[in-house]
Image (cartoon, rainbow, N blue to C red):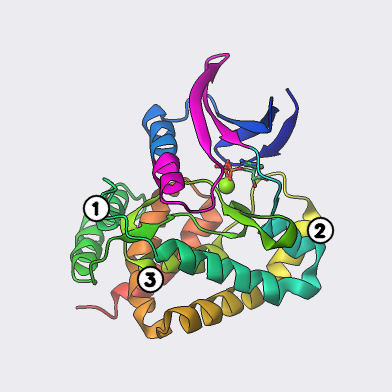
Amino acid sequence: MEQMGQGRTADIFVADDNKVLKLYKKGFPIEAIHEEYGVSRYVHNLGIHVPRPFEMVEREGRLGIIFERVPGTSLLHLMTQRPLRIKRFSRTLAALHHHVHSHSAADLNRNHKEILAHNIQSAPLLTDAEKSKIIRYLQGLPEDHKLCHGDYHPDNVLVGDESHSWVIDWMTGMAGHPLGDLARSVLLLTYGTLPEGTPKTKGLLINFFRRRIKNQYIRHYMKLANKDYAEVDPWILPVAAARLADGIPDAEKNALLLDIRARLKTIS
Ligand SMILES: Nc1ncnc2c1ncn2[C@@H]1O[C@H](COP(=O)(O)OP(=O)(O)O)[C@@H](O)[C@H]1O
Ligand SMILES: [Mg+2]
């Protein structure tokens, strides 16, 4: 089978009949793969543009999901190929995220605050007292049950001809507060490291344009949602703490930890 892509969790292969096989790395938690299949089906049934999930399969001891193959290129790739269009691509990123958030997911059995609290609880580097304080703070943030992606960034959006686009990689999808979901994307655009194997020039370009992408994305989302960034900022603390549990490089963890501790000082 021809390999067409690679992420942190899986390898993507071309399968027959306009399909792809997302084959998870050995040892990847089975429950998480079931979550991705279940959430992908849920989101596809809502009518959102996502590759249709067909079935779960096993290949040489690895679990995978067969998806419809969509004719798109990731926004991350497009941003490096056409840096003059960064502003337009960043707006597309914002508009699609806002569209995802316009859907209720009240009957999706995955709750944003519960998932954040669980991840904060299992985060390395934080003391128990810090974890309790952050979880208490999280409980005081506004409730909502909109569809949230949970890992929304330019490599999880595919764009094709005539601006057809698809949001992929729904393992972390959940019902929650749009601005909490936005906070995660802001953090990824601030501190996130690029996938392993990213060519050096591509990495340099993205790092150079990072701030511009983030600012355009935030500005356009705020305009569409008619919100103020002051409503997003409170979400950064719990979302950053939960991010520590993600198995990210040490440099990223340390940068997050500094931000978390500075924010902890400002709350009672
Ligand atoms: N349904 C699909 N159709 C076409 N390309 C896809 C599809 N799913 C994934 N890809 C390609 O594979 C890459 C990684 O897929 P993704 O689901 O984001 O994996 P990971 O969870 O490892 O990040 C994408 O950026 C894209 O280039
Ligand atoms: Mg991905």
Q: Which mark is residue 179?
A: 3
Amino acid carrying label 2: it is Thr
Judge whether residue 190 can be spotted in this image: no
Q: Which mark is residue 114?
A: 1
Circle 1 Cα neighbour tier, 10 Å, few/some/many (<14 / 14–19 / ≥20): some
Percent x, y of residue 177: 32, 66
Q: Is residue 45 magenta?
A: yes
**SS under mark 3:** helix
Amino acid carrying label 1: it is Glu
Q: Which mark is residue 201?
A: 2
Identify the mark nearer the N-term, 1 or 3. 1
- Residues at circles 1 and 3 in contact by the CB criterion of under 8 Å: no
- 3D distance between C-alphas at marks 2 and 3: 32 Å
Looking at the image, residue 134 sits to the left or right of residue 90; the answer is left
In the image shown, does 249 or 36 lie closer to the viewer?
36
Quarter that holds the N terminus: top right
Identify the mark nearer the N-term, 1 or 2. 1
Q: Magenta residues?
A: 39-68
Question: On screen, 51 above or below 15?
Answer: below
Looking at the image, residue 27 sits to the left or right of residue 146; the answer is right
- Residues at circles 1 and 2 in contact by the CB criterion of under 8 Å: no
Identify the mark nearer the N-term, 2 or 3. 3
Quarter that holds the C terminus: bottom left
What residue appears at the point 68 percent right and 58 percent down from the top-left corner? 76
What residue appears at the point 68 percent right and 28 percent down from the top-left corner? 17
Circle 2 Cα neighbour tier, 10 Å, few/some/many (<14 / 14–19 / ≥20): few
Quarter of the image where ligand 1 sits = top right
